[in-house]
Image: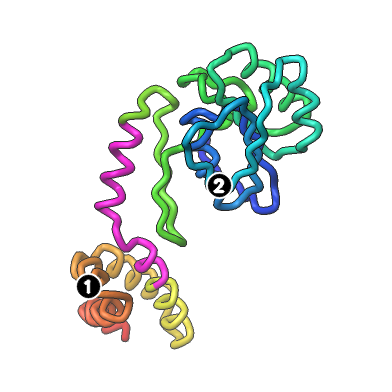
Amino acid sequence: MIPLMHDFEDETVLIVGGGPVGARKARTFATEADVVVLSPEFGDRAFAGAEQVRAAPTPEEARDWVERTDPALVVAATDDPDLNDAFSAAAKAHGVLVNRADDHGDQSFGNVVVPATVRDDPVTLAIATGGRAPALSKHLRERFEDEFDNAGLMAALVGDLREDLRDRGVPAAERRDAVRFVVRSREVWKALDSGRYKGEQVARDVIGELPGDQT
């Protein structure tokens, strides 16, 4: 499968199933989309402000629910394979994406996988194991969270740095070398622990070590 980023702003995501998986999916998509969760019960779980509709849809009602909510994505997250099948088929008939929580690596045409995600805006890292090893996805996510702490600050720093060097008329090849030097510098990463200002100071010192002194 080829990873893509998808913008769900102002879109609806329909989640069928209010168990732990459905709740986790709701928390994932509620940061951007309007999320509707269908379930006969919800328990004491966090759904991040998603609309919780207490209902026990049958397979025969799947098409009606999809047409009624007009989602960009349907998440089939129940423990009933027949119900998941029905909502997946209804979604595909409606021309929208499907995420099957019970496929476990055997994804069908038109299905999407929701990866484990590390987010430090504007940086997003996604980890997927094809549904075969969720524990590994979680482990790698936790390692990436530790390894790439301050990635968002680094992205903002080098973005501004590139613009500054361009405004100064620094040639493109030298700008690329400078930015690469900064993002590979352990000193800059460590300095970012003390905030953006300290990181920028160290970054400019690091660039000054390049042949030709970029600053």
Front-most of residues 146 and 156 = 146
Residue 76 image position (x, y, % from top left): 60, 25
The relative height of residue 151 versus residue 130 in the rendered view (above or below) is below
The region drawn magenta spans 136-156
Q: Using the rendered image of the protein, determine whether residue 170 is visible from the camera's viewpoint.
A: yes
- Bin the neighbour count of mark 2 within 10 Å (Cα to Cα): few under 14, some 14-19, many 20 and up: few
Q: Residue at x 28, y 37 (%)?
A: 139
What colour scheme has been applied to the protein in the rendered image? Answer: rainbow
Decide if residue 22 is on the left or right side of residue 181: right
Residue holding disc 1: 191
Amino acid, disc 1: Ala
Name the residue tied to disc 2: 5
Q: Could you tell me if residue 210 is visible in this image?
A: no
Q: CA distance from mark 1 to mark 2?
A: 30 Å
Q: Earlier in the sequence, mark 1 or mark 2?
A: 2
- Residue placed at 35% from the left, 34% from the top? 137
Which residue occupies the foreground of this view, 6 or 54?
54
